[in-house]
Amino acid sequence: MPTSDVGCSATPAASTLASFKLAGRRALVTGSSRGIGSAIALGLAEAGANVAIHFTGNAGQAHDIAERAAAFGVRTGTVQADLGADDGARRAYDGALAALDADGIDILVLNASVQIPRPDWLTLPRDEFEQQINVNLRSSLELCQLAAPGMIERRWGRILTIGSVQESRPHPHMVVYAATKCAQTSLAFNLARQLAPHGITCNNLAPGVILTDRNIGRLADEAYAEKVRSAIPVADFGTPADCTGAALLLCSDAGRYITGQNLYIDGGLGLAN
C-alpha cells in the first residue's frame, strides 16, 4: 500500500536558495565596524538587507564597512553609540532607523561586547564589572525591548546574539565576560519562547577562537598560538567569515523553524576536554 508524507513536498533548489534572501529587510548589527560584526553585516547586505553599521569609536572603519555594504545595492549607514551609556541602546536604535530611513528593525544582531581580561578576579573593580554588564547584557535587553514590538506587529523578526565558546569553556582571566555571555544566551532562550508565536526567532552564535583584531595580538606569540591551536579539534583558528553563513541562516526565512538554539562556531573546541 503506498504511503504518503503528509505536509511534505519536494522543494525546488531555487526556492531553497531564495529562502536565504533578505531583500527589503532592515538590519542593525551592533559592533559591526570590525571583526565578526562586520563580516555578518556584509553577509546580510550581500543577501539584500539594508544594514545599519554600529560603532563606538572608529568612524573610519565603520564608514569603510558601510561603503562595502552599499556596493551590494542596499541602503546602509553608520550609527555611533556607546552601549555602556544609559541612553546607548536608544541612541543606537534611533540612529539605525534614521540611517535606513526605516520605521522598524527586522533583524537585530547583538554582537558588540567589552572584554576586560583580569588575571586576579579578587581585585576586579566594580567599574570593570559594570562596563561589561552594561554593554554585553543590559544593552542587549534594551535593544530587544525597542525592536521587538515592531517585529511582533509585522509578525516577522530575527534576533541573534553573539556569544562565545567561553559559555562552556570560560577563560580564568575573563570571569565577568564569560558570565555576561552566559546571561546573554539565557536572555535569547527566554525571548525565543515568548516571541515564537509572533514569527520571531531568537538564537545565539558562540564563536571560538576567531582571528579578529581582539585575538590576533594575543596569538602573536607562536608558542602560545600553537598551544591554543592544538586544543581545537580542526587544528585551525576561525575567521570572521566563518560566522557569516550560520548568521545568514538564522536571520533569514531559511531558519524560520530554528529558535532557542546555541550554535557553536568553534572548530569543535567546545567538545575538547
Image: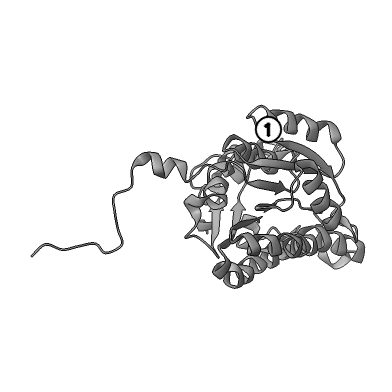
Residue under the point 75% across and 58% down: 174
The single residue placed furthest to the left in the displayed view is 1
User: Where 84 falls versus 55 (above or below)?
Assistant: below
Instruction: Decide if residue 96 is on the left or right side of residue 222.
Output: right
Question: At which x and y percent is residue 132?
Answer: 82, 59
Q: Amino acid at mark 1?
A: Ala
- Name the foreground residue: 60 vs 92: 92
Question: At which x and y percent is residue 232?
Answer: 54, 47
Image-quadrant location for residue 239: top right
Q: Secondary structure at mark 1?
A: helix
The reply to whether residue 205 is visible in this rendering is yes
User: Where 87 falls versus 198 (above or below)?
Assistant: above
User: Where 165 falls versus 99 (above or below)?
Assistant: below
Which color scheme did the rendering employ for the protein? one colour
Instruction: Decide if residue 33 is on the left or right side of residue 22.
Output: right
Residue under the point 83% across and 62% down: 134
Question: At which x and y percent is residue 16?
Answer: 41, 44
Image-quadrant location for residue 161: bottom right
Residue under the point 33% across and 42% down: 12
Q: How many marks?
A: 1
Image-quadrant location for residue 204: bottom right
Q: Residues within 10 Å of mark 1 (few under 14, many from 20)?
A: many
Instruction: Decide if residue 2 is on the left or right side of residue 238.
Output: left
Residue topped by disc 1: 69
The reply to whether residue 239 is visible in this rendering is no
**Which quarter of the figure is the N terminus placed in?**
bottom left
- Name the foreground residue: 37 vs 128: 37
